Image (tube, rainbow, N blue to C red):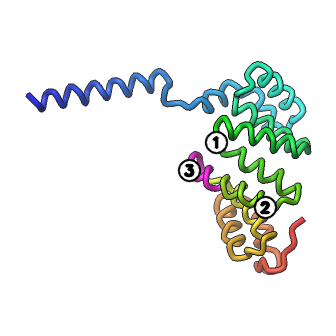
Amino acid sequence: MEFIAVLLVAGSLTLYVRYRLWRGDGVSQAERDQVRLREGIVLMDRRLYDEAFAYFEQVLAREPRCAVALACRARCQLMLGNLYHAIADCNRAAGLDHNLDTIYLDKGVALFRLGQIRDAFVQFDKAVWYFNTHARPSAEAYRWRGVTRLQLGQYTRAEKDFHRAVDLGDEHAMYFLSMRGGSLDAVEVE
């Protein structure tokens, strides 16, 4: 009798979980937003940042709390050279959804370009962690963390980051490894 009760409960639970997945409850809001905002994301992929920025401005006028739109607008701001606006959009996006891995990478790049190397390193470290935890490892995040480590004098750790980036297919990291015969000591980064 107890066995039948356990089977009924387990069967009911299985049906409930399948129903929730079928309804789309297994998909995060960010994933739904990425599908919905595909038009603007395609513009960014094509490097049409002015047009993408205008697209995300319209989206945010209707939906000011859309974290994905904020993260995408931050990327546009970064690519258009509006570094402080990019940082502000990254902060707002992180406040709404701290699991968006690209915001840490974009904020780190903006901080690096502003000369705030230690703060940039913290963001790149977060980007590496979030990409490894929530998505897939990012060669770009490893490369940028390696570049900041060079600036901070952490040559051995920078070399490890560059090797990891190369393993993930990053050709830019290979450049840093090839400098000075493979030794990262005394390498200067612009």
- The Cα–Cα distance between marks 2 and 1, rounded to whole angstroms, is 28 Å
Task: Give the prevailing secondary structure in the magenta stretch.
Answer: helix
Q: Would residue 130 be counted in the magenta stretch?
A: yes
Where residue 88 sits in the image (x, y, percent)?
81, 41
- Mark toward the start of the polypeptide (1 vs 3): 1
Q: Residues within 10 Å of mark 3 (few under 14, many from 20)?
A: few
Name the amino acid type tagged 3.
Thr
Would you name the residue on which mark 1 appears? 98
Q: Is label 2 or label 3 in front?
A: 3
Would you name the residue on which mark 3 appears? 133
Would you name the residue on which mark 2 appears? 172
Q: Residues within 10 Å of mark 2 (few under 14, many from 20)?
A: some
Write down the region rendered in magenta.
Answer: 128-136
- Mark toward the start of the polypeptide (2 vs 3): 3
Where residue 144 sits in the image (x, y, percent)?
76, 59
* Horizontal side of residue 123 vs 48, given as left or right: left
Position of residue 135 relative to residue 7, above or below, is: below
* Horizontal side of residue 2 vs 16, given as left or right: left
Quadrant where the C terminus sits is bottom right
Where residue 39 sits in the image (x, y, percent)?
75, 26
- Mark toward the start of the polypeptide (2 vs 1): 1
Q: Residue at x 70, y 72 (%)?
A: 159
- The Cα–Cα distance between marks 2 and 3, rounded to whole angstroms, is 24 Å
Name the amino acid type tagged 1.
His
Where residue 183 sits in the image (x, y, percent)?
77, 80
Q: Is label 2 or label 1 in front?
A: 1
Asked which secondary structure carries label 2, the reply is helix
Q: Would residue 22 be counted in the magenta stretch?
A: no
Quadrant where the N terminus sits is top left
Q: Are marks 2 and 3 in contact (CB under 8 Å)?
A: no
Q: Are marks 2 and 1 in contact (CB under 8 Å)?
A: no
Name the amino acid type tagged 2.
His
